[in-house]
Each structure stands twice: as structure tokens, then as C-alpha cells.
Image: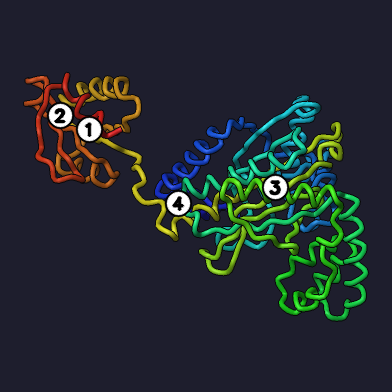
Amino acid sequence: MAKQIQAIRGMNDCLPADTPAWQQVEAKIRQVVASFGYSEIRFPIVESTDLFKRGIGEVTDIVEKEMYTFDDRNGDSLTLRPEGTAVCVRAGNQAGLLYNQEQRLWYMGPMYRHERPQKGRYRQFHQFGIEAFGISDADIDAEVIALSAELWRVFGIEDQVELQLNSLGSNEARADYRSALTEFLVAHETALDEDSRRRMHSNPLRVLDSKNPEVQAVLADAPRLHDYLDAESKQHLSKLCELLDAIGIRYQLNDRLVRGLDYYNRTVFEWVTDSLGAQGTVLAGGRYDGLVEQLGGKATPAVGFAMGIERLVLMLQSLGKLEGLRPAVDAYMVLANDDAAKAGVQVAQRLRQQLPDLRLMMHCGGGKFQKQLKRADKVGAQVALILGQDELENQTITVKWLRQDVPQQTVALSQVVNLLNDLN
């Protein structure tokens, strides 16, 4: 017997029992972005490796250790996309959508990073992202954050998440702070772990993200990012806070908050939760005004965020927020004899056309009546539609309710549409 081929570690199937939860989450995401007037954009899974080296930064963990990169037959270096922002900028630049224009876009789909798989964090994972281009004012930052807050309201988890907010300042202010932080880290090098010593010259702001308690103790005396902010960035942050206050979005200012990618400036934010155990991030984003130009376009202000869907689904499941999921089948047609098979095909087709939202499965392959009813129950159908000899002779159909304490009834075929309409 041939050896079974297994899925790649960290790349998981989404089985039929799991897909209703994903469909519900995706449908609510689509509902929210539509209410804000954002347009969907879709782009390839494979991109030029240079896109991520230039956009994300060559000294980030993603580029250094986590990307799935390979040479194609022409010798070109290609990479499975590890994130969506750089790809969205590339697509916008290429299509001429960004320069001197406003665009408010969203995307959803798989991303790839070769890191150690753990619960809610996989090598193939799915992200939902928002990118808004062409607006430099803090009001678009507030809108993007408001959109993320609306997600939590729609999912019923407002009380399970906290917004943390910071500003990285202008590129110049960030560079000054980076120099001061590097100088501090060098002076305390012996107290740092190996990972922090490796980062302190190439990407020192990432040291602030260290989960090592000993490193965090050292950082207690480190220079504060807020002290290096330029006047415009301070004003931008102040206006953003005023707008968030005005719409009732609570936040916590956290001047240790940085983002792991090189392209961020000014506003950065994260929604964090402890409902999955240790506090973790469920959505993160910020402003990246220099990335469009960095990737070959004209200077364009931009802000956005990304959210991992696996972590969100896990969180919603753990909180019991995904109950009442609609099964794949609403009605199951039971065919009591061979004569009913031909008529069943006709009836099923007519019902699907008249009730396009009805999920109707017709029994195939023959079998005993009771076995067909068991099958109807197993697939989660609310009703069994029974066609037998009496029904064929009288142009009727019998409706047997499988999930409710409702008497079985036989109705004319012409009336069954009204009865089933409530199942949609």
C-alpha cells in the first residue's frame, strides 16, 4: 500500500466542519468594510523577492529567516508573500492607482512564513488587511482604527480587546531615536540576550519588543521614543487622540510599542487580548508614508492594518461567539422508491431556482428509506423532503422536521416553496 502523503507542517486543511466558522467571520468582515466604503483588491501569492527586501527591510526576521524563497526556471528569485502591505503598494503603483489619488482598499487571503508552528500561528496563515492611500491627515488614521473597532463590535468582543497606540515620529526623528537607543544598548550589551545583541545595530527598535524579562528590566532606563518626536508628529498624535475620544474608542498610549517592519512612521497601533492565554496581538497597523516612494512610486501618504484570521477564529470560538452557524444543508430530499428518483431531480431543480438561497441536497445512490433519513440528520438538514408513491400520485411532498418539534405535514408541490422560504 502506497505511503500516504501528508500536508506540509504548519499548513493546515480547513475541513467541512470548520468552514462555517470561517464563512461567518469572512462575511462579517465583508459587511464592515462595505459599510466604510472600502474596495477589495486581490493580488498574486508569488512576488519578486526584491519587493520584500526593499519594502519590509533586509534585517527583519521575516526577510532574514522566515520567507519561502526560491528561484524559478529563469533564475528569478521569487517569494511566497509573507504580508500584504508591500504587495498592495506594488499593485497600486503598477496600476497607476496611487499617485495624487485617494484609495481605500482591503484584501484577504493566505500568507506564508517559515516559522515554528504554534496554536493560531502557522506557516500558511490568512490575513485580512486594510490600506488607505493619499491622505496625510490624522482623520484617516482614526477611520482605519474605527473600522477595526467596528469589527470587535460586530463580533461581540469589544470587552476582550484593548487598543494600544504610539507614534514613531518622522523618519528623521525615528533615526535620531534609533541612534540614541543603539548607544544605550551598546553600553548595556553584556546584560542583553543573544537576539537583542544581534538586533541592536541592525534593527534596535525591535529590541523594545523583547519578551525576555531581563532585557525588559534593562530597557526600563532606555531613552523614551516620545522624547524624540518632532512637533508635527506630536500634533498628529494629539489630533488622532482627540478624534478617538470623540467617537468613544478607548486606547492606551504605549511608547514602547513599535512595529517589526521598517516602513512604519508616525502612528502605530495594536489591538491586544489575553483571552487566548498570555497577552497577544490580534490586529496591528500604522502609517507608512515612505513605502510607496521606496517601492518606485511617487511619494504618497498611507496607513493600514492587518489581522490574522486564524487567531480571530480561535478567539471567537474560545469565547463562544460562533454559535448558531448555518449548516451546509437546509433540506435533504429523500426518495422512497426508484420512480421518485426522476421526479426528485425535477423537483429539486425547480426548488433551487425558486429559492436560490436554499441549501438543498438530494439523496443519490439509492438505499432504504430509514438510511436516507439518517443521512439527512447527519448532514445537519433542518427538514427532510420526502417523495414516495403517494406523493407522486397526488403531486405533493411530505415535509419532516428534523430539528424542531413540529408535526410532519404533506403539502402540494406548488405550496412547498412558501413553507421552505423561512429556512433561508
Q: CA separation, marks 3 and 4?
A: 25 Å
Write down the residue under mark 4.
Answer: 156
Does the residue at mark 1 contact the one at mark 4 (Cβ under 8 Å)? Answer: no
Picture disc at residue 76: none
Write down the residue under mark 1.
Answer: 333
Left or right, 83 with respect to 344, comes to right
Residue 8 vertical position relative to residue 50 in the rendered view, above or below: below
Label 4 sits on what residue type?
Answer: Gly
If you read the primary sequence from the N terminus, does the residue marked by circle 1 or circle 2 appear first? Answer: 1
Q: CA separation, marks 1 and 2?
A: 8 Å
Write down the residue under mark 2.
Answer: 387
Does the residue at mark 1 contact the one at mark 2 (Cβ under 8 Å)? Answer: yes
If you read the primary sequence from the N terminus, does the residue marked by circle 2 or circle 4 appear first? Answer: 4
* Along the viewing direction, whichever of 407 and 104 lies nearer the viewer: 104
Q: How would you rate the neighbour count of disc 4 (Cα within 10 Å): few for under 14, some for 14-19, many for 20 or more?
A: few
All told, the count of numbered labels is: 4
Q: Nearer the viewer, mark 2 or mark 3?
A: 3
At x 51%, y 54%, the residue is 4
Q: CA separation, marks 1 and 4?
A: 36 Å
Q: CA separation, marks 2 and 4?
A: 43 Å
If you read the primary sequence from the N terminus, does the residue marked by circle 2 or circle 3 appear first? Answer: 3
Q: Nearer the viewer, mark 3 or mark 4?
A: 3
Q: Is residue 284 visible?
A: yes
Q: How would you rate the neighbour count of disc 1 (Cα within 10 Å): few for under 14, some for 14-19, many for 20 or more?
A: many
Q: Nearer the viewer, mark 1 or mark 3?
A: 3
Give the percent coordinates (x, y) of residue 309: 55, 49
Label 2 sits on what residue type?
Answer: Leu
